[in-house]
Image (tube, coloured by chain):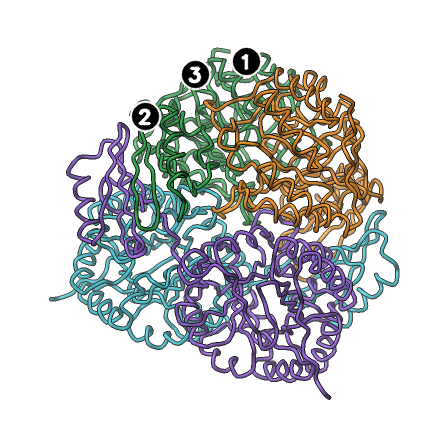
Chain colours: A cyan, B purple, C orange, D green
Amino acid sequence: MIIVLKPGCSDAQIQHVIDRIEELGFTPHVSRGAARTIIGVIGSDEMKLESQPLQAIDGVERVVPILKPYKLASREFNHEADSVVEVKNVRIGGGHLGMIAGPCAIESEERLMKIAAAVREAGANILRGGAFKPRTSPYSFQGLGEEGLRILRRVGDRHGMPVVTEVMDPRQVDLVNQYTDMFQIGARNMQNFDLLKEVGKCRRPVLLKRGMSATVKDLLMSAEYVMAQGNLKVVLCERGVRSFEDSTRNMMDISAVPNCKGLSHLPIIVDPSHATGRPDLIPAMSLAGIAAGADGVHIEVHDCPEEALSDGPQALLPVRYAQLMDQIRKLAELMNKSIDVAEEVAV
Amino acid sequence: MIIVLKPGCSDAQIQHVIDRIEELGFTPHVSRGAARTIIGVIGSDEMKLESQPLQAIDGVERVVPILKPYKLASREFNHEADSVVEVKNVRIGGGHLGMIAGPCAIESEERLMKIAAAVREAGANILRGGAFKPRTSPYSFQGLGEEGLRILRRVGDRHGMPVVTEVMDPRQVDLVNQYTDMFQIGARNMQNFDLLKEVGKCRRPVLLKRGMSATVKDLLMSAEYVMAQGNLKVVLCERGVRSFEDSTRNMMDISAVPNCKGLSHLPIIVDPSHATGRPDLIPAMSLAGIAAGADGVHIEVHDCPEEALSDGPQALLPVRYAQLMDQIRKLAELMNKSIDVAEEVAV
Amino acid sequence: MIIVLKPGCSDAQIQHVIDRIEELGFTPHVSRGAARTIIGVIGSDEMKLESQPLQAIDGVERVVPILKPYKLASREFNHEADSVVEVKNVRIGGGHLGMIAGPCAIESEERLMKIAAAVREAGANILRGGAFKPRTSPYSFQGLGEEGLRILRRVGDRHGMPVVTEVMDPRQVDLVNQYTDMFQIGARNMQNFDLLKEVGKCRRPVLLKRGMSATVKDLLMSAEYVMAQGNLKVVLCERGVRSFEDSTRNMMDISAVPNCKGLSHLPIIVDPSHATGRPDLIPAMSLAGIAAGADGVHIEVHDCPEEALSDGPQALLPVRYAQLMDQIRKLAELMNKSIDVAEEVAV
Amino acid sequence: MIIVLKPGCSDAQIQHVIDRIEELGFTPHVSRGAARTIIGVIGSDEMKLESQPLQAIDGVERVVPILKPYKLASREFNHEADSVVEVKNVRIGGGHLGMIAGPCAIESEERLMKIAAAVREAGANILRGGAFKPRTSPYSFQGLGEEGLRILRRVGDRHGMPVVTEVMDPRQVDLVNQYTDMFQIGARNMQNFDLLKEVGKCRRPVLLKRGMSATVKDLLMSAEYVMAQGNLKVVLCERGVRSFEDSTRNMMDISAVPNCKGLSHLPIIVDPSHATGRPDLIPAMSLAGIAAGADGVHIEVHDCPEEALSDGPQALLPVRYAQLMDQIRKLAELMNKSIDVAEEVAV
């Protein structure tokens, strides 16, 4: 940490800062220049110091943190190799791509069965579907709840696909835990810290979506919340951030993929469905994500978007998804990545 | 709602859209032009139509909603006069300013007592303090929990000030409800819909902070979530949004004040502490908020910011708060606004 | 400047950084900690060092500048008192409000005469009008050019009002200089550095609008460009920045007012017309700007917005402007600010 | 265009809107609903209508444009096939990738010769280098000017590479035109309309960079400015936009690639150097751009970044560029794209 003092600050003020740092058990390095005095405090336990409001001390202009505020999620602090997260038998990370597909919301067993068959046939290896839906309007369809979870479980088992579904409320964690293979934390809940703590207490993988205005650092801090509870199986997900561009639903920040990979050992996938909100852009953005090093792609697929109960306009048709998977397979091969196949099921 | 069809879309596609609209019980008005066909559907129950994914129909270029998606929060649908929300004996809205002040986190009874005495003396009429703190880092101070609530209640009662405190988890709503006079929903939880529903079931006023990347419409939709459960006592709060400007913590969107007032009857206050993160900017921005028509100001005050356990660097000293209140009182008078006085308490 | 080295960087790398700094004539202060080594370089000529790409040196993680990169615009480096810019006989800054009003574009002498009479009567003291218009579309009205400048001059003189008009092209500076009392640099040209240099060579005041995605620092750097050429008469203008909020044209960052005033001695005014694009929000935002300490307000006024050749939908009617000026005068009085009166003219 | 009237607007107001539209030579289609009246005006010359400030008419709530405001740049209006822009003998677009590389600024003939040799060897087919530099600070190196242009021309000719260089000032267009094969319009000048008109009068290709807060529509409107003057050889360039993310210089909006390709026939390339400002992210983002369909990549390369006079910290080393080009070639092959080879030169 570096503490920059204001121009013209008094000796007494400088001494007060020094005293405060020493009180907290650290050793200050003071450099007095013509224009400014700066005080460096360097130590591996800097994190403790950073929670101190040193910036509030009279005479302090700025406090510049040096160390990353996350540890367990950090490549630097923790481990150098890429983490591989296993969702049942499907690996994500370390050269293995997680291909998550399915409808936005679970609408009925029949429909989900049909969509699951199509995406599995195309090569998807994890089935998604929402039972609890975070809708902007209280008057929109809010999901089938537990009935939806039961359907998802049955359809996933029938097609040999592990399943992922969103959990929105700490009170639902136990229930969802009974049915799902992976928790999804949605963008709106990326900083719902009580929810993060609850899924952190489970041992199931967590798909953690980046919040709509979260920095890469914020995303890693939220992963740290889950990991600090003992659950290290976190998969990050870039799903677009809010911007001034009005022709796409969000702005997909693909640079978050190599950026996170540099900072963290955790796998990261991309979600071009929510990032763009436009089926015409999903194929190009999926390929871009893989080319940038993403460990998978999350895509919403619906066999009849105009009848979908949630987010129909952004869903891809199964036939289009299959074409895209052909392209993704070729690109994956070029990049020496493999895609685990959902396990065979005897009927 | 207006449905714009793609150039060169076929008669069969147009007819399919018409059929779909009629199936849903609406009457389409079709206008065929040289370059485009557009279909208008106008009705007061348009909201039902808007949840339909018409944009997913083949041949549809764009769907333009016309009516506002909120009803209870809307000035147009609901009622023309400004709502006044009473927090115990303190009115917010309709010409009455709510002056909320106190520390970021409740740290101890002694410290809170001291700060409360100072802000009450300066003219604050509602006491704030956090018992459950949403911290970006899992390693930061997370609040005193129920012990903090008890302290807040005692200090509020001692100084005759109603109290407001944040609730972050639906499971805490009952507990917090026993101690507080007003719930605060923080920016990170503005779209924590389960939490909104829980406080919507209570009958206590709710201070709803704008999310960091929420539009004014999103904010009103979240108010609608609370109101749809029967709790109409919502006070909106502008607290800054994320932006590219790196010299302030957030960007305070003061235009949200007159903007919300045009669209909604709900009171709206401003929070320059979180919006700027800089004590040197808080006074100017408080006055700006009042001048723009805000129904109150929320300010964090701490008697020793350098020792604060949370957000110290953005806290105002009590003496500075008192000077600011002098300026606010004069401005309020100019604008014909009054500030209820926290009630006298016999010791 | 502080140079933070990467964890595990070698002694040779550290030495190379030290050598480089010494070569450039500076003295490095090295602090070696357990987790990181940091090197401080403190000097009043740090600016020269900052143009060196030290961050590109192997082993360097981050370079943190300490000093402000502007000098002439800086309160700290240059002078402590507020600058007062005189536009003919009208003062802006140091307690004097510049009230700039007029149509977006100069359309005809008759119309401008009528609008000028109305705004002068209401209390405006500087007349604005565009002769060269930066339009997003090449097919929109581009302004009357020199004929517009002649009209503006005549109307300004007739009403005893100094005039301000936009210059967009370095080749027009001489021409515009013959007719105007103040140059306006529009938001789109805030970083048109050749244009800034040209107006910097003149001795006329410059109204410098903040770019749509410029930080406060960027704005001050652009002021520095003008000032570095010898023209110190710069008035800054906050006119809103691009954001995700879609119900206003831009987001007005009122905090830029006290923020700039802390960093710089230059006057700063606000332009709620471009910031909001909505006449219903202009009055509230004008008052907010003044309350935050702005040195004036720039408002577009048109007597028949539905016939305006440019930006009609955001123009205020003269009657509404007059009402607003009544409110502004009262607020100005409360804040001990005065408004110079445009000089009397014998007809 | 659709005109939405306010709830409760009077018959006289509706009639006034109708009269106004008819006066302008259009035919209004009026639909009266329970909650709102809407008026549709559909015609291929809608563009003329859109420059009218109908939104300023009393009783009008909102005006929704339907047609795209650009014509020459539009795929829909103009032509369906992808345009191919030839920079001397190097094609960009229609399956041909433009690989632009070189230093940020031209520093000396020797250095540029060395860098050019390296990037040509690696497979770059167009040489870049700045002679006029738009620097944020007036105290930074501003470029070598005409001497730089001469060097660029000689080095390009020596290596058989067409050259591209930035033009910032309309007064420089003739000069730069004598030396360059392609004009670059930088992000800061994307809406410098006089400059756009000047390069539009030339017949040389223009590399048009997206402004830092420009929407895709704004970018296409700026292309339209150039094209409306007769110069149709425009290549768009995504180079990142301003955002709240603070770990990269800008946020690279890769979705702009397929988005522009859907709307326009113009080629579009990506510039990961300026978009990220970080050499560690450039390779991944280059591949992502190509995978998303970009027609080329613009990369800054410097043989000794720590000595570069401009933007050194973001430059790629020649060896790293060569490795990246190997990857790009393989990806290009997978996507059936070819890369023209800079022509052989006899020495």
The answer to whether residue D88 is left or right of residue D80 is: right
Q: Chain of mark 2?
A: D
Numbered circle sitting on residue C94: none
Is C125 above or below relative to C156? Answer: below
Name the residue rendered at 28%, 29% in the picture. B35
Look at the numbered disc 3 and give the secondary structure of its residue.
loop
One can see residue A100 in this view: no
Q: Residue at x 41, y 16 (%)?
A: D89
Q: Quadrant of the N terminus of chain D?
A: top left
Against C221, residue C114 (above or below) is above
Q: Residue furthest left?
A: A347
Residue type at numbered disc 2: Ser
Frontmost of labels 2 and 1 is: 2
Query: Is residue C268 at all visible to an observer of this figure?
Result: yes
Q: Which residue is mark 2?
A: D44
Q: Where residue A142 sits in the image (x, y, percent)?
A: 32, 65
Circle 2/circle 1 CB separation < 8 Å: no
- Judging by the rendered image, the residue that carries numbered circle 1 is D177
Inspect the image, locate mark 1, and give the three-letter code of the amino acid beneath it. Answer: Asn
1 and 3 marks in contact (CB < 8 Å)? no
